[in-house]
């Protein structure tokens, strides 16, 4: 109940600090994709990109397997955050003599492996310490800081600012400082629980596959049409460069992330996911129509009707941000068994990594491990129609999607190898009418979608709980404070124990937040002791 009453600010801030080393790894990846990270050829950048993707491919399932079998995720998360930092520090302070090619390879491999491991362990931690109602906002904050730091790192690289003569020196030191601050905050002391919602992640994954296929087909068919239209324009490089949105395209991406996270917390994951499928359908249908309209209306110099292209680029970035905010850290760790969420999430991301690698390879016409990647010209003829078909199939499959908000509960470490006959015998022997009433009350608490009033709490918990511990039995509560507590509507320690420190300090005259925390701690301890005696 307490986690549903107020946003866990300290927990969220601690976990969001991991966005700095996360952004550092993404900065390395984006530099490889653009071919500007090192002073080597584009082909060599693409070769390093392939090796990095291979490192992430190996690291993802291993991290997921480990995450399900250990409890010290914070320590593993810190180690994963330090992997690219260590590689960067070795470039600044060459303690170990290395050739430039070896140093580049080490940075790339550790950045990809660290990014994959960080993502898995961070997904586990945010699902352990923040309930579903506030998780979307926490993830949005994480992505916001990540995108901001990514923009800062790019700006520092463009300005040529270095430490130790290395372009990644500033971002390396910044990430190291962030990790040291995290260690100082001791995240391993944060409260945690095994949260989960009944259902199957496959029901979300199948329509997601069709969404990604629709987006890939639409993107490359549209890209081919645009390149064909601008074939006589030597100034044309990309649509974002042509429209002047090259440096502000992160803005609509960020807005999309925030929109999906806010909607996921307010309306639920299912409604947010359905909206994503609807937007992808609109993009595949009307996106191509907008481009075709531009081709027909613009003049030879390509300077008129640019508003159509600007609007479409902004819409595409918004949808990509919406997909990023919803489909990376949400849904996959939230639905299904709590005992396999690490491996389940890593395997789904394994597929996403393959999709992104294929997307980059096709977009760059790259040669990786001797294989030339290009989009087949035959698909440009009917790829757009198949993109629309895949979007419609995805929309058709959203009916049986399981809900998450209001259905997430804390899982216990119980054995799940009972057969149906054992379950029926156990239920018949031990569950009676009174027990069902108790279970219903607990479900009412878990399913509470907004703050509970005192009358609601009394109705759920029952009148018999009020007399467990009188107010004056709480250490630190004297006659004067007892009078103030009763004036604020508190009749027993059980009522006080169900409060939050800020709310208690606000309702009781003259009570500070620090004093309220002390009283709550003692009240909960006394109530637990009394319940054990009954």
Image: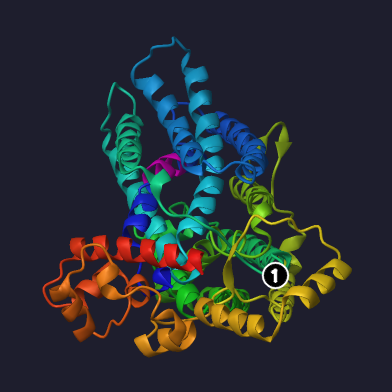
Instruction: State the residue in front, 161 or 464.
Output: 464
Q: Residue at x 20, y 72 (%)?
A: 505
Q: Residue at x 56, y 28 (%)?
A: 44
Tell me if residue 505 is in the magenta stretch.
Answer: no
In the rendered image, the vertical position of residue 345 relative to residue 285, given as above or below:
above
Q: Can residue 82 be seen in the rendering of this structure?
A: yes
Q: Residue furthest front?
A: 533
Q: Can residue 243 be seen in the rendering of this structure?
A: no
Instruction: State the residue in front, 389 or 115.
Output: 115
Instruction: State the residue in front, 219 or 109.
Output: 109
Question: The N terminus is located in which quarter?
Answer: bottom left
For label 1, the residue is 199
Tell me if residue 23 is in the magenta stretch.
Answer: yes
How crowded is the residue under tag 1: few (<14 C-alpha within 10 Å), some, or many (20+)? some
Magenta stretch?
20-27
Q: Residue at x 68, y 76 (%)?
A: 401
Classify residue 184 as left or right of residue 207.
left
Residue 337: x percent and y percent?
A: 68, 60
Residue 281: x percent and y percent?
A: 63, 77
Residue 347: x percent and y percent?
A: 69, 50
User: Dominant secondary structure of the magenta stretch?
Assistant: helix
In the rendered image, the vertical position of residue 343 relative to residue 224, given as above or below:
above
**SS class, disc 1:** loop
Q: Residue furthest left?
A: 510
Q: Quadrant of residue 59?
A: top right
Residue 181: x percent and y percent?
A: 30, 40
């Amino acid at each position: 109940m307490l986690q549903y009453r107020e946003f866990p600010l300290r927990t969220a801030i601690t976990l969001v600090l991991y966005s700095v080393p996360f952004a550092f790894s993404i900065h390395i990846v984006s530099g490889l994709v653009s071919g500007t990270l090192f002073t080597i050829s584009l082909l060599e950048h693409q070769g390093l990109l392939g090796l990095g993707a291979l490192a992430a491919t190996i690291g993802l399932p291993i991290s997921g397997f480990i995450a399900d079998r250990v409890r010290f995720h914070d320590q593993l998360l810190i180690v994963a955050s330090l992997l690219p930092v260590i590689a960067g520090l070795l470039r600044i302070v060459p303690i170990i003599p290395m050739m430039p090619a070896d140093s580049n390879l080490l940075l790339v491999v550790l950045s990809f492996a660290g990014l994959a491991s960080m993502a898995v362990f961070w997904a586990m931690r945010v699902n352990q310490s923040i309930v579903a109602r506030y998780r979307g906002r926490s993830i949005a904050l994480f992505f916001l800081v990540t995108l901001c730091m990514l923009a800062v790192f790019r700006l520092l690289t463009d300005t040529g600012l270095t430490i130790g003569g290395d372009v990644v020196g500033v971002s390396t030191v910044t990430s190291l400082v962030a990790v040291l601050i995290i260690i100082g905050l001791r995240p391993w002391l944060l409260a945690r629980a095994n949260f989960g919602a009944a259902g199957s992640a496959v029901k979300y994954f199948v329509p997601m596959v069709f969404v990604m296929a629709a987006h890939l087909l639409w993107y490359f068919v549209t890209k081919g049409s645009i390149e064909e239209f601008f074939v006589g324009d030597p100034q044309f490089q990309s649509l974002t460069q042509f429209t002047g949105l090259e440096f502000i395209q992160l803005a609509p991406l960020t807005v999309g992330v925030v929109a999906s996270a806010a909607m996921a917390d307010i309306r639920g994951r299912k409604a947010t996911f359905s909206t994503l499928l609807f937007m992808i359908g609109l993009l595949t249908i009307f996106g191509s129509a907008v481009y075709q309209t531009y081709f027909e209306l613009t003049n030879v110099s390509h300077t008129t009707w640019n508003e159509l292209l600007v609007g479409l680029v902004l819409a595409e970035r918004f949808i990509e941000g919406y997909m990023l905010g919803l489909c990376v850290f949400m849904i996959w760790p939230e639905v299904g068994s709590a005992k396999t969420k690490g491996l389940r999430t890593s395997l789904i991301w394994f597929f996403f990594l393959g999709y992104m690698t294929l997307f980059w390879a096709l977009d760059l016409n790259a040669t990786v491990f001797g294989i030339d990647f290009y989009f087949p010209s035959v698909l440009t003829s009917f790829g757009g129609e198949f993109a629309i078909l895949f979007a419609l199939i995805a929309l058709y499959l959203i009916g049986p999607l399981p809900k998450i908000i209001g259905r997430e509960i804390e899982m216990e470490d119980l054995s799940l190898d009972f057969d149906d006959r054992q379950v029926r015998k156990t239920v018949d022997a031990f569950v009676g009418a009174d027990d069902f009433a108790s279970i219903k009350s607990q479900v009412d608490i878990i399913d509470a979608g907004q703050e509970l009033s005192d009358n609601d709490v009394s109705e759920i918990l029952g009148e018999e709980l009020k007399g467990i511990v009188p107010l004056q039995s709480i250490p630190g509560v004297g006659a004067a404070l007892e009078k103030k507590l009763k004036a604020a509507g508190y009749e027993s320690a059980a009522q006080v124990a169900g409060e939050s420190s800020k709310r208690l300090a606000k309702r009781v005259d003259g009570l500070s937040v620090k004093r309220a925390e002390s009283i709550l701690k003692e009240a909960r301890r006394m109530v637990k002791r009394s319940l054990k005696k009954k």
